Image (cartoon, rainbow, N blue to C red):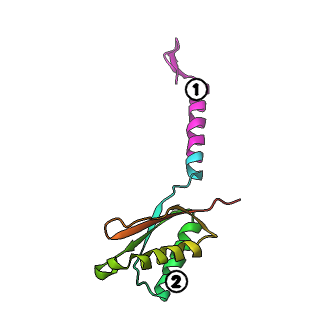
Amino acid sequence: MKSALTPNRQFVVSWTTASSLYEKSKSSKEQKKKQKVIQVKEIKFRPGTDDGDYQVKLRSLVRFLEDGDKAKITLRFRGREMAHQQIGMEVLTRVRDDLSELAVVESFPTKIEGRQMIMVLAPKKKQ
């Protein structure tokens, strides 16, 4: 804001500058309101996850993807489950196939990392 001292010793403020600054800040606040922050939500599976639990976790994944968030599926192996990694791959493939209409696979695990496999799904773009 520009200000000058007049002969009467009063401040004169340039309202054009002040109003333009106000309008810029107002428009930037409006743009921030319209933005959506994408979060990564995580669901944990096990190779022996039964059908009822699987359906509950799948509903949660559907809700996350419909809200526009990414979904991280972690498949944990414990004990002797490490010897049967193909069962874990079948679980991840089943999740991928069940959510093929809603999601795109960003990363599909090719090998095991430590004691877990991680798959990341992103929601499909709306047309």
In reply to whether residue 99 is colored magenta, the answer given is: no
Instruction: Using the image, determine if residue 117 lies above or below residue 8.
Output: below
- State the image quarter where residue 16 is shown: top right
Is label 1 or label 2 in front? 2
Residue at the far top in the pictured view: 7
What residue is shown at x 43% (from left), y 79% (from top)? 87
In reply to whether residue 28 is colored magenta, the answer given is: yes
Range of magenta residues: 1-30
Residue at the far right in the pictured view: 127
Name the residue type under label 1.
Thr
Residue 80 - label: none
Kindly state the secondary structure of the residue where label 2 is placed.
Answer: helix
Whole-percent x, y for residue 7 in the image: 52, 11
Whole-percent x, y for residue 70 in the image: 51, 62
Binning the other alpha carbons within 10 Å of mark 2 as few (below 14), some (14 to 19) or many (20 upward) gives few
Instruction: Using the image, determine if residue 50 lies above or below residue 29.
Output: below
What residue is shown at x 58% (from left), y 23% (from top)? 14
Choose the circle earlier in sequence order: 1 or 2: 1
Residue 55 - label: 2
Q: Which residue is mark 1?
A: 17
Give the left or right position of residue 16, taking residue 57 as reference.
right
Instruction: Using the image, determine if residue 17 lies above or below residue 83.
Output: above
